Image (tube, rainbow, N blue to C red):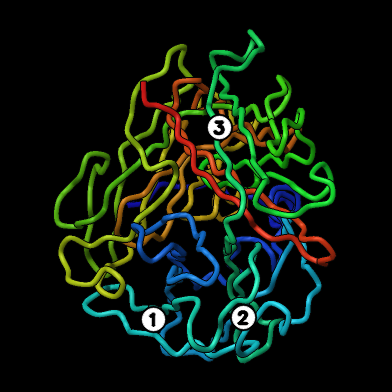
Amino acid sequence: MGPSFLKFPTLLILLLQSVLCFAQSPYGNDVFRHEIKSVEFYKVDKQAAAFPVISLNSDDKVTLGFDDLSGGSRNFYYTLEHCDANWNSSRLSPAEYLQTFMDDRLFNYTYSSGTYQKYTHYELTLPNQNIALKIAGNYVLKIYEDGDQKKMILTRRLYVLNSRVAAGGTIVPPNNVTTRRTNQKLNFTVDYAGINVQNPNRDIRVLVMQNTRPETGKMNTLPTYIRGTQLVYNDVNINEFAGGNEFRHFDTRTLKLNSERVGRIYRDTANTVMLLGDPSRNLPNYTLLYDNDGKYYVINQDGRDSRTDADYAHVYFNVGTNKPETEGTPYIIGQFNDFKINEASRMQFDSRGRFYTDLLLKQGVYDYMYVWVNNATKQPDYFALEGNYFETENEYQLLVYARPAGARWEELVGYSLLRTVRP
């Protein structure tokens, strides 16, 4: 009953994978095994999908949860590694940034209950009595099998804050007339009076991210000017982001009835969800739509514990592009797949003139968007199918990094969250 797909030669698929995949490394948000699904990593005292930033030497904690669809239990281990602001290894000994053990086994797992798709749910809370942190900064959490880091399962980025500077800013229209209707510009200041740095131009860097997406982030290495202990970043040519559009969404919190974007639900030996067709949204004017800024939430309204009784479904997407398949291909991205443009997120052309794909997703609420990739340039176009508007509501994260005097590492010393005002 599912849509038919064109079959691509193996060589072409391998070529596309090599060109389009974001580089997977031990220092990004990556999943290395196809049977690992529904990875969530968030601050415990916030709602799920909250940005994983915690304060050093506080009661703050983060939770990692994920499912293993291969069933049974496996020997998963975990560790943390300190990184610089660009997510390169700080090359420190674990004894320099960990108070306790270097690694630990992941013992907390539960089998699914009452679901068509059987899985094992794993969960981890950090810091804990076996793994605790000494210094602030960027950390990559590594999950691997049999105590062997060559058998990497997944990685997540953790931000540990030692708040010693004040950062704040505003979101304004760009000075450039040609981008005033599409882009958003950030002007901000950092007051470093609380830290001792020898050269603020050299020792302080500020990363600006839109909706927690590091692949589109902008690193500020030099302020526009210095006013006392304030670093001012307001040059007309920096920190300008495309506004984009509000994310599309669908809701599978229950598989007993159709929600707003669900066309049909089939339940037999597996769950199948057919979403309504998506049109291109590259229109002249902005349309208000409430979204979750790309996030997703695992929720099952029909059960008691979404971690283990939420089921999986094959969710079918289809989009009309007004573009021939000879020019390019759309990809579907969101936090649920770490915004990865790769073979797993690639859509295929159907004989009825639309692009289709199906993804195996756990019950919940999902934000997503379509990215058009041109066959000739291999470059992603985030706005060809979604549009680009200054009015779009977005979140911006400001992360301030400093290198302590005489230290061999960078610390996260400031964090601020900015939001655009809904129109």
The secondary element bearing badge 2 is classed as: strand
Instruction: Find residue 188 and report its horizontal and vertical position in percent.
Output: 61, 32
Three-letter code, disc 1: Thr
Residue under label 3, please give it. 169
Q: Earlier in the sequence, mark 2 or mark 1?
A: 2
Marks 2 and 1, how far apart in space? 21 Å
Label ID, residue 242: none
Quarter in which the C terminus is drawn: top left
Label ID, residue 120: 1
Q: Nearer the viewer, residue 4 or 276?
A: 276
Question: Residue at left 46%, top 43%?
Answer: 356
Q: Nearer the viewer, residue 203 or 405?
A: 405
Q: Earlier in the sequence, mark 2 or mark 3?
A: 2
Marks 1 and 3, how far apart in space? 44 Å
Instruction: Find residue 85 and report its horizontal and vertical position in percent.
Output: 72, 55
The secondary element bearing badge 3 is classed as: strand
Residue under label 2, please give it. 79
Three-letter code, disc 3: Gly
Question: Residue at left 57%, top 65%?
Answer: 156
Three-letter code, disc 2: Thr
Q: Viewer-nearest of labels 1 and 3?
A: 3
Question: Residue at left 73%, top 46%?
Answer: 205
Q: Residues within 10 Å of mark 3 (few under 14, many from 20)?
A: some
Q: Is residue 171 above or below residue 368?
A: above
Q: Viewer-nearest of labels 2 and 1?
A: 2
Left or right side of 370 for 307? left
Instruction: Find residue 391 and report its horizontal and vertical position in percent.
Output: 44, 21
From this viewpoint, is residue 364 visible?
yes
